[in-house]
Amino acid sequence: MNVIAIIPARWGSKRFPQKNFVEFDGETLVARAARMALESGKFKQVIVTTDAEEPERYLHHLQGVRIHQRSVHGSSDDVQVLEVCAEVLRDLELRVDYVCLLLPTSPLRAVHDIQQAVQLATDGKYDAVMSVCEYFFPVGYAFDISKDKRLQRRFPELAVLGSDKHPPAVVSNGAISVLTPAMVESGTYVNENSIAYEMPKLRSIDIDEREDLDLARAVLHMHRNET
């Protein structure tokens, strides 16, 4: 089965400039994602799509990584990730069975997570596999907050229940999405033929701000001290 990995690594970022290229545990986030994709042994091609200048200098030590230079539209602030993946398929004239989207900003994702998510998709012939984790708090305790900071229960019928009585709820952690080309072209992550790949909360940290990077480094340090 022809499965490829696409790693989107845009240079610009409003909240955390060049976050895809910051150092984490001795390598950049984009290099870490590419290395793990290669180590998984699941992909015919590992492709980094970027608008960075001279991206090879971040990936030169990795043999077998293909670089796709994004278009102007693909580098814009409002472009969606699946639009970029569709651009990669078209530009490189690729015909594949599955695309595995690996965001560099999930540094605590493990090689076995990639392997198991891809295997889940190919064995079950699902249209999509999405990595998820539990919310840190029961979703039934959520509030809506107005511009003037007033609070209103979002799920008042659940707020009266004990935390152990809340129905299970998960959220996409952004680490792994395995999708058919049709799903990529439609810009859709899930449909009726989709399934979840569950990951622990502490390995689901997404680097969106500098504080997230500090937290991920602390979690990695904690895990290493435990082993």
Image (cartoon, rainbow, N blue to C red):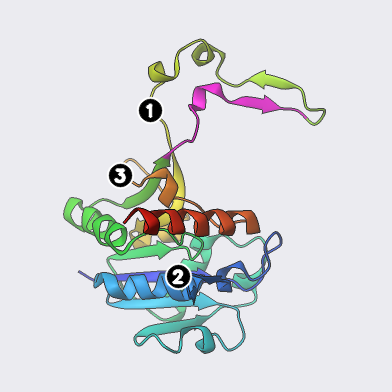
Look at the image and give the residue range highlighted in magenta.
134-146
Give the amino acid type for the residue marked by disc 2 in the picture: Ile
Residue matched to label 3? 195
Tell me if I can see residue 81 in this picture: yes
- C-alpha distance separating marks 3 and 2: 21 Å
Q: Secondary structure at mark 2?
A: strand
Residue matched to label 2? 7
Q: Is residue 19 above or below residue 58?
A: above
Q: Secondary structure at mark 1?
A: loop
Front: mark 1 or 2: 1
- Tell me residue 12's x, y (percent): 67, 70
State the residue in front, 171 or 137: 137
> Which quadrant, please, contains the N terminus?
bottom left
Give the amino acid type for the residue marked by disc 3 in the picture: Ile
Which is nearer the N-term, disc 1 or disc 2?
Answer: 2
Q: Is residue 107 above or below residue 49?
A: above
Residue matched to label 1? 168
* Disc assigned to residue 180: none
Crowdedness near tag 2: few (<14), some (14–19) or many (≥20) residues, C-alpha within 10 Å: many
